[in-house]
Amino acid sequence: MRVLDHPSRSLREFRLLPALTPADASAPDVSLATSLCRSPTGEGATIGLTSPFVSAAMQAVTGRDMAVAIAQLGGIGVVPVSQSVEAQCQTVAAVKRFKAGFQTDLVTLSPGQSLSEVAALMERTGHTRFPVTDTGIFHGRLLGVLTDNDFDPHSDLGFRVADRMRKDVQVGVATRDLREANRLMVETGRGFLPIVSEEGTLLSVVFKKDRDKHLRHPAETVDSQRRLRVAAAVSTHPEDRERVQALLEHGADVLVLDASDGHTAYQAEMLETIRRVRDVPVVAGNVVTADGFEFLAEAGAAAVKVGMGVGSGCTTQAMKGTGRGQATALMDVAAARDRHAERTGQRLPLIADGGISGPAEIVVALALGADCVMLGNLLARFSESPGRIVRNRSGQDFKEYWMEGSARAANARRYAQTRAGFFEEGIEGWVPHEGSVYDGLPLLARALRSALSTAGCRTLAELQERAVLEPQSPASLAVAAVRGMEPRDLPA
């Protein structure tokens, strides 16, 4: 038994000290480009991101919509393992097929469906436009389109889709060029354009909102074929060896080992197993000590996740007494990473996972050595996450959020448990709904650029080299918070 004589520190205890801001380091000039992990393509090569954001491998965070959005915004999504192999592969394949234009992964209606069923579908999915085909299957013959403007959700629920759908639909016939499809859509003045074959079979749909997003976000995370990149989580359990093969066949760019404790022999075994299947980058973890990092680095990890027991809804520390403050964990692991790089000439990226509630914690994590940050709670608040939106009696919107260690997700394998003897290491609840990630994440990026500029840094590499951080007393943190006033609107 050994007791360390210094306390563990959290990210929110630190503040970044200002430094001289050069003329070429104003906020708009700051680059947030970073490395996600080592790439198997060559010595020293990495898979890069233009923004240091990684969406967590959680049911409540990363589905198809979030994975697409965060890749378009310069980060990458990790599709969770706590689902069937087929469902996970479908999500990966949908992201790889998405080309900021032609979409095929859409809910489609049949003419005989009731409008009450459609209304429930709209409420559940948030979608408001649906193609109608003769079979109700996407690649059926297009008969029309039904939108939320075509029926009254109060008086028309007894009717069928065929009674209210619009048949005068402008289409593109066998259009394969996205520019031509966008031109036709602009000409028709509609927000979407179905693409059909010469025989009238629905092939795809082009949405104006996707065109606008592509134009607004040119710094996408893409592979050599200009497809969006996506990562997928796998467990260290033997039954996931078939999952690994299936995910790679469906186009996963990176695999992420899903475990709350990465300092185990099982991680080394799975790294070796995956290496025998294909030379694909594998992010390992989570660890919170230098020894844990060294173990995964020697086992062949392409990057290492750092963090244990510090997620917003995580109860691991309360249940098991294991974990560490995220700032202390990053400092310890980053120092080990630097020693490993000096010894081997290979620098492994670090991903800070947990303990992050806003831009202040993100910039501190990056300054302490993280190359990327994995976000759960922050991203679960946006419309693109899978959770339902519910409005309370005061008119405020909230989104469902549940941890992978909760009874709802029951991701027993992540926590080295069995389903029969499962105990919770996380909770489920609600987080405020904050609109679209297409608005929220760029705002977060602007805050980070401003922070780097104030610290006199142009890049994340400069931040890690030059940053001066200082732990704050509780009184200092209290003075820096909003105080002496109520942050609310004036009464009417």
Image (cartoon, rainbow, N blue to C red):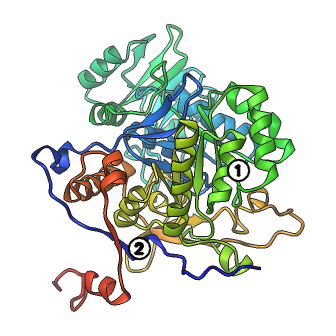
Kindly identify which residue carries mark 2.
12
Query: Which mark sits nearer the N-terminus, 1 or 2?
Result: 2
- The image shows residue 163 at horizontal and vertical percentages of 50, 39
- The image shows residue 136 at horizontal and vertical percentages of 62, 32
Tell me which amino acid carries mark 1.
Phe
- The image shows residue 184 at horizontal and vertical percentages of 30, 18
- The residue located at (71%, 60%) in the rendering is 261
Looking at the image, which is closer to me, 221 or 67? 221
Question: In whole angstroms, how far apart are the C-alphas of marks 1 and 2?
Answer: 28 Å
- The residue located at (45%, 33%) in the rendering is 145
Residue 312 falls in image quadrant: bottom right
Indicate whether 315 appears above or below 244.
Answer: below
Q: Which mark is residue 295?
A: 1
Q: Residues within 10 Å of mark 1 (few under 14, many from 20)?
A: some
Indicate whether 117 appears above or below 143.
Answer: below
- The residue located at (74%, 77%) in the rendering is 320
Looking at the image, which is closer to me, 121 or 344? 344
Residue 179 falls in image quadrant: top left
The reply to whether residue 318 is visible in this rendering is yes
Q: Residue furthest front?
A: 343
Indicate whether 105 appears above or below 415.
Answer: above
Is 234 situated left or right of 459 in this image? right
Q: Residue furthest left?
A: 23
Residue 104 falls in image quadrant: top right
Asked if the residue under mark 2 is in contact with the one under mark 1, i.e. CB atoms within 8 Å, the reply is: no
Which one is in front in this view, the residue at disc 1 or the one at disc 2? Answer: 1
- The residue located at (44%, 45%) in the rendering is 128
**Quadrant including the N terminus:** bottom right
Q: Residue furthest top?
A: 198
**Quadrant including the C terminus:** bottom left
The reply to whether residue 116 is visible in this rendering is no
Q: What SS does tag 2 mark?
A: helix
